[in-house]
Image (cartoon, grey):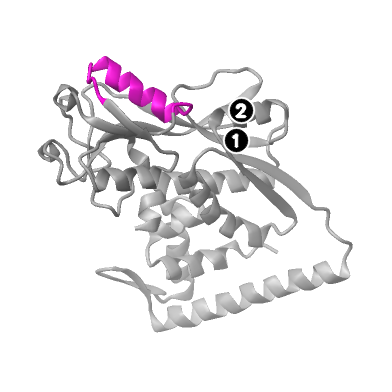
C-alpha cells in the first residue's frame, strides 16, 4: 500500500518548508513542488499559503492534512494487525561501527526515523577508534563502519564512500590574544598565519587518532613549536577546555560545537579529514539497511541545519 504522496503533504505541513520537507523525504524540491502544484490544481484550491516564516496550511489544507494523518494511522494499525495474524517475520541484524561521539548522535537521529518503518531489523552499534573498527570489519565482525581518516582508504576488498571531506580548523576562545585572526564563520573560516601561533599551548585528540595525526602535520609544516598540554578523547570536553583558557586546538571544523561561541581560523594550506563509510565489496548492505545509511549521510550533510 503506497501512500507516500500523503506523507508528502503531512511532511510539508510539519516542516513548513518545501526545502526541508524534500530533505526529510529524500526527494528533490522540484519533485515535491510539482506534486503539490498538481494536487492543488486537481482540487482547484490551495492547500498552503506562504508567509514570512514558511508555509502554513489553508483551511482546506488543514482538513486535507488531518485526513492524510488518519489514513496513515490506519495504515500503521493495519500493518501491526497483519503482523499479529501472519507468520513471525524474520529478524536480521546489521552491525555498524562508528568512530566518534558526534557520529553516534547523528546515528541516533537517523535511527529514530528508520526503526519505526523497519521493526524487524536489529542494529547493533560499536564505538571505537578507526583502527579498531577497521580490524573488526576485516574480520567481518562488523558489516559496515563509519570512520574519520586522514586519507582516503584504497583497498579493493572494500567499497568506500566519502561521506564528508572536513577541512581542519584552528580553534580558540574569544578571549585569546589572537582572537582577532578568527571568526565564528564555521563554514568558511578566515585564513590566518599559523606562524603567529608559535609557542602556543595546545590540546589535541589522542595520538592514536587521525585528528592527532592531522594536527601534528599542521604543527610541523608551520614549525609552530607548540606545547601539547594534554590529549582529550572527548571533543566537546576539548572545546570547553579551549573556551575556558588560552589553549588552542586543531580539529575538523565540522566537529566544533556551534553553541559555545568558539572562534575558528584555518591555515593557508588546506588539511582535511575524510569521513568514510566502508563495507566489504562482496557483502553490500541490504536495500533496507542502505536506507539507514542514506539517512545517516543526509544527517551528516545537514546536521547543523537540522539541530540549530
Q: Which of 122 and 17 is in front in this view?
A: 122
State the residue at coordinates (41%, 30%): 211
- State the image quarter where residue 154 is shown: top right
Dot 1: element: strand
Residue 217 position in % (x across, y down): 34, 19
Secondary structure mainly formed by the magenta segment: helix
Comparing 132 with 3, the one in front is 132
* Residue 85 placement (x, y as % from top left): 87, 71
Q: What is the quadrant of the N terminus in the image?
A: bottom right
- Mark 2, residues whose alpha carbon is within 10 Å: few (<14), some, or many (≥20)? many
Which residue is found at the position 42% from the left and 64% from the top? 37
Q: Which region of the structure is painted magenta? A: 207-226
Residue 94, numbered label: none
Q: Vertically, is 266 above or below 23? A: above
Which disc is residue 134 wearing? 2
Q: Which secondary structure lies at badge 2?
A: helix
In terms of image quadrants, where is residue 7?
bottom right
Position of residue 176 measured from the top left corner of the image (x, y, whole percent): 15, 41
281 vs 191, left or right, is right
* Residue 209 within the segment the image draws in magenta: yes
Tell me where residue 13 appears, x and y as whole percent: 44, 70
Q: Residue at x 36, y 53 (%)?
A: 305
Q: Give the answer, above or below, for where 25 lies relative to 102.
A: below
Which residue does the numbered mark 1 point to in the structure image? 145
Mark 1 and mark 2 lie on one chain; the one further toward the N terminus is 2
Location of residue 115 with respect to 248 vertically, above or below: below
Q: Is the residue marked by circle 1 packed among few (<14), some (14-19), or many (20+) residues within 10 Å?
A: many
Amino acid at each position: 500500500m503506497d501512500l507516500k504522496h500523503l506523507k508528502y503533504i503531512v511532511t510539508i505541513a510539519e516542516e513548513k518548508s518545501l526545502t526541508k520537507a524534500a530533505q526529510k523525504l529524500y526527494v528533490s524540491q522540484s519533485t515535491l513542488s510539482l506534486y503539490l502544484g498538481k494536487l492543488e490544481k486537481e482540487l482547484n484550491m490551495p492547500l498552503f499559503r506562504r508567509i514570512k516564516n514558511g508555509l502554513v496550511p489553508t483551511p482546506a489544507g488543514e482538513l486535507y492534512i488531518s485526513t492524510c494523518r488518519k489514513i496513515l494511522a490506519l495504515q500503521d494499525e493495519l500493518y501491526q494487525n497483519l503482523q499479529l495474524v501472519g507468520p513471525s517475520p524474520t529478524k536480521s541484524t546489521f552491525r555498524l561501527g562508528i568512530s566518534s561521539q558526534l557520529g553516534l548522535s547523528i546515528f541516533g537521529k537517523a535511527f529514530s526515523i528508520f526503526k519505526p518503518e523497519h521493526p524487524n531489523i536489529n542494529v547493533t552499534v560499536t564505538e571505537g577508534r578507526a583502527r579498531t573498527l577497521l580490524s573488526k570489519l576485516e574480520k567481518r565482525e562488523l558489516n559496515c563502519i563509519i570512520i574519520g581518516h586522514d586519507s582516503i582508504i584504497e583497498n579493493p576488498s572494500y567499497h568506500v564512500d566519502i561521506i564528508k571531506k572536513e577541512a581542519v580548523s584552528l580553534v580558540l576562545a574569544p578571549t585569546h590574544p589572537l582572537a582577532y585572526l578568527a571568526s565564528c564563520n564555521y563554514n568558511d573560516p578566515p585564513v590566518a598565519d599559523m606562524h603567529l601561533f608559535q609557542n602556543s599551548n595546545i590540546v589535541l585528540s589522542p595520538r592514536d587518532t587521525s585528528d592527532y595525526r592531522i594536527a601534528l602535520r599542521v604543527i610541523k609544516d608551520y614549525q609552530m613549536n607548540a606545547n601539547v598540554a594534554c590529549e582529550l578523547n572527548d571533543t566537546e570536553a576539548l572545546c570547553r577546555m579551549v573556551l575556558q583558557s588560552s589553549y588552542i586546538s586543531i580539529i575538523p571544523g565540522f566537529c566544533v560545537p556551534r553553541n559555545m561561541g568558539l572562534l575558528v581560523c584555518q591555515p593557508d594550506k588546506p588539511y582535511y579529514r575524510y569521513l568514510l563509510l566502508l563495507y566489504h565489496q562482496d557483502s553490500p548492505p541490504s536495500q533496507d539497511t542502505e536506507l539507514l545509511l542514506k539517512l545517516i549521510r543526509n544527517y551528516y550533510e545537514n546536521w547543523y541545519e537540522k539541530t540549530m
